[in-house]
Amino acid sequence: MEIYCRGVARIRHAATGEIFEIENDELDWDAVGGHERSMGSEIHYEAEIDHPELGDLTWGLWEYPIGIENHNITYVGEHEVVEDFDYGLEHGEPEFDDWLDYEAPTNPYLVFMNSYHHTGDLLADHGGVRGDHLVNRMIFSQQITALEAYLGDTLLNEVMRDKVAMQRLIDQDEDLGKVKLTLSDVSKDPDLVMRKVRTHLRGVMYHNLKKVDVLYNIALGIRILDLVADRANLFKAILLRHDCVHRNGFDKEGNPIDVFTKAFVQDTADMIRAFVQCIQQAVELRVV
């Protein structure tokens, strides 16, 4: 099964009456829970947005029994849904897992720092003065990508080398909790559990910092969001990167985004570097 989400959501602010539009490509869907019922497993899927004006917005979808859409709920707090997405479950063709043979680098921090220095050199040598310059936008997007890669590779490496961390993740992560294995499965493949955990971690959207914070806390006892010096600007940078990647540097109304000056891009890089350095220090101080 696959989740489809089409159209645009239009939400009216409860206090100002202003209507905000949210496009379907802004939603990242994840399986966030599930439990056993009389006809088998029920799986809860959810997409959440931390909107700068509307706050937390959530779209929920339940699959029960497996293969059947049970119901869905849109939660926008005190605001009003003027028009919602068309979203639900549909059958999709199985796809080859391009990440099946992926091995995380042994030192994700070094990879990140090399990216930080290289993109900084590119910005200085080839960046433009204007805030909508293409090279500036590309470098800005790479900075967020490098953060995601660091978060994913670091968590994967730590969990794979620490059996206690892996067990905590298996016990407490709701997505892994719904995976059912038989004794026959495990006896045929002693590494099956480890491979399931690895596949799960590779499938996480690491720009969803709230979810990543939960995973780091479960597995490693580290609350990464407590280590952010400027959480609001970091979340804003992730949203801006979405506009760079999916809208070629334009906002939802089709207006060019012109904040990507050299100073802005470098300040964002420095903010992300400081964040990564704090996480790396916390990881290195762990007692395994």
Image: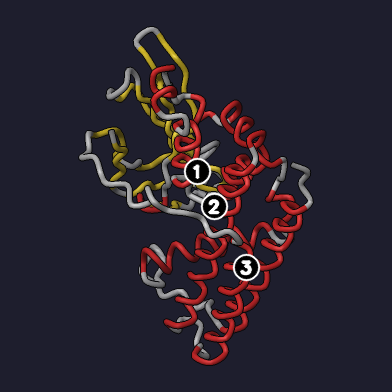
Q: Which mark is residue 154?
A: none
Mark 3–mark 1 CB contact (< 8 Å): no
**How far is the residue under mark 2 from the one under mark 1?**
7 Å
Q: Amino acid at mark 2?
A: Gly
Q: Residues within 10 Å of mark 3 (few under 14, many from 20)?
A: few
The residue tagged 2 is 152
Mark 3 or mark 2: whose residue is earlier in sequence: 3
Q: Secondary structure at mark 3?
A: helix
From the top left corner, tell me how far across and down residue 226 is, in percent: 74, 50
Q: Amino acid at mark 3?
A: Leu
**How far is the residue under mark 3 from the one under mark 1?**
21 Å
Residue name at image x 37 percent, y 63 percent: 246
**How far is the residue under mark 3 from the one under mark 2?**
14 Å
Q: Is residue 62 left or right of residue 172?
A: left
Q: Is residue 112 above or below residue 218?
A: below
From the top left corner, tell me how far across and down residue 69 is, in percent: 30, 25
Q: Secondary structure at mark 1?
A: helix
Mark 2–mark 1 CB contact (< 8 Å): yes
Q: Quadrant of the N terminus?
A: top left
Foreground: disc 3 or disc 1: 3
Residue name at image x 53 percent, y 76 percent: 259
Residue name at image x 44 percent, y 24 percent: 186
Q: Quadrant of residue 110?
A: bottom right
The residue tagged 3 is 110
Total numbered circles:
3
The residue tagged 1 is 201
Taking depth in this image into account, of 9 and 12 the one nearest to the observer is 9
Mark 2 or mark 1: whose residue is earlier in sequence: 2
Q: Is residue 262 above or below residue 33?
A: below
Q: Quadrant of the C terminus?
A: top right
Q: Amino acid at mark 1?
A: Leu
Q: Secondary structure at mark 2?
A: helix
